[in-house]
Structure formats: C-alpha cells, structure tokens
Image: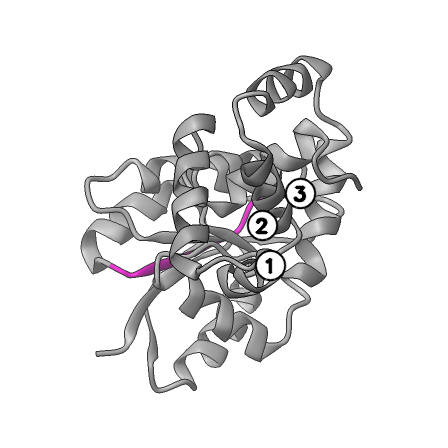
Amino acid sequence: MPLRVVLVDDDPLVRTGLAMILDSTPDLEVVGQAGDGDEAVPLVNRHAPDVVVMDIRMSRVNGLAATAAVRALPRPPAVLVLTTFDLDEYVFDALAGGANGFLLKESSPQEIIDAVRVVARGESMLSPRTTTRLISHFVEQRSSPRRRRAAVSLSTLTEREREIVSAVAQGKSNAVIAGEFYLSEATVKTHITRTFAKLDVANRVQLTIFAYEAGLVTP
C-alpha cells in the first residue's frame, strides 16, 4: 500500500506541484489537500494519512497551530513542515512543538520524496545540509532564559550522552555515531532514548534544538 499524504498549503500552485511530485512515485499517494490550517484536522480525520506536509504561513490558522492540533490527535500522522527558511519565524516552534521535520520549499523533487518517506517511518527529518543553518538561525534569536534552562538540563547528561547529543545535532545517523565512538548501534539508540527521557524531548529534532540552546553545538 502506498504511503498516504495530505497537503496543507495556501498556495494552490505549491499544492499542485507537490501533488505531481508525490503522485509520480509508486509508494506515495496524495489523498487530500487543504488551503488553510483550520482544514487540517478534518482532512486528517477523513483520510487517515501517514504524513501531512504542512505550510507555515496561512491566512486563518497558521502551520504552527495546525501542527499542534494534528499531533494532538489520538493516532496522529507525521507532520513535515514547509518553510522558506528566511521568512518563517514560526518554524522553530513548529519543530519544538511536535513536527517530525521540515522541508525547504526550494528542495529538489527527490529530497521531497525522501523527506516524506523518512517521517513516515517515524524518524525525524534532519538534513545535514539545511538543519544546522535553520536551527542555529532561530536559536540565535531565542531568549536567554531558555538557554539557561538548557544549560541546567545539560548537567544531567553523562559525558558520553553529551557527545552523542552533539553528534545527533550534526545530523549524523546512529550507524555513523556508532562507528565514531566504537559502539554498537543498539547502544547508541539506548543512549539517545535515555537523553530523550532526561531532557523531556520527543524526537531527534527537539534533541538538536536542545543541543544548540545548551551550547553543545554552535552556529
């Protein structure tokens, strides 16, 4: 069965282009489209998609609020946030609030297809090419109290956990991290799971945000 995708974007040309790209791939199928964030939850309830590709700036309900509403559903789909990077100041909060990853609107068709597949597997979309630029850009604008809280939380991690969090923030996979630190992938996964619990984060995107706020990784 192909992965079911819903598109939420107020630009019909963007929706049409995305639909053409995704529907051209045998394992992906666009099952619904919406022009504003207030249509996201009804659309998800109607079509039960695996992934929602969500724009940020929309006229009635923006992508931040719509993402939170979708992710609060009993069986939420993955949410892949659309961003233009320079203009979408809400994208940082969308990622911190439960989105599974982000997609630049300038991405190539193959990058779009790969991103949908990644988040559909329950993984976070962390592209080394763009994640560092995007997250560091917004972390630089965050308030100092957030940074102080992150620094306090950092003290709860072991030295090995700090090293692994830093590696995750650089977009490295579990396999690459395991090779660098001479660990098994299962051990790396265990360390990451423990840091999720200690830091009260839900996924690798939020872990990456923490790493920047705590100063483990610098812009």
Q: Secondary structure at mark 1?
A: loop
Q: Quadrant of the C terminus?
A: top right
**Colour basis:** one colour
Which residue is found at the position 60% from the left and 59% from the top? 172
State the residue at coordinates (52%, 64%).
12
Q: Is residue 178 visible?
A: yes
Residue 167 rendering spot, x and y as whole percentages: 62, 50
Residue type marked 3: Asp
User: Where is mark 2, residue-wise?
Assistant: 168
> As rendered, which of 45 and 152 lies closer to the eye?
152
The residue labelled by disc 1 is 172
Number of numbered labels in the structure image:
3
Local SS, label 2: helix
Question: Mark 3 or 2 closer to N-term?
Answer: 3
Q: Is residue 36 left or right of residue 127?
A: left
Please state which amino acid type lies under the numbered disc 1: Lys
Other-residue count near label 2 (Cα within 10 Å), few / some / many at <14 / 14–19 / ≥20: many
Residue corresponding to mark 3: 88
Segment colored magenta: 49-56
Q: In the figure, residue 149 lies in which quadrant? A: top right
Amino acid residing under circle 2: Val
**76, 9: nearer the viewer:** 76
**Image point 56% across, 66% down: which residue?**
14
**Residue 67: quarter of image:** top left
Residue 135 at what x, y percent from top left?
Answer: 68, 43
- Quadrant in the picture for the N terminus: bottom left
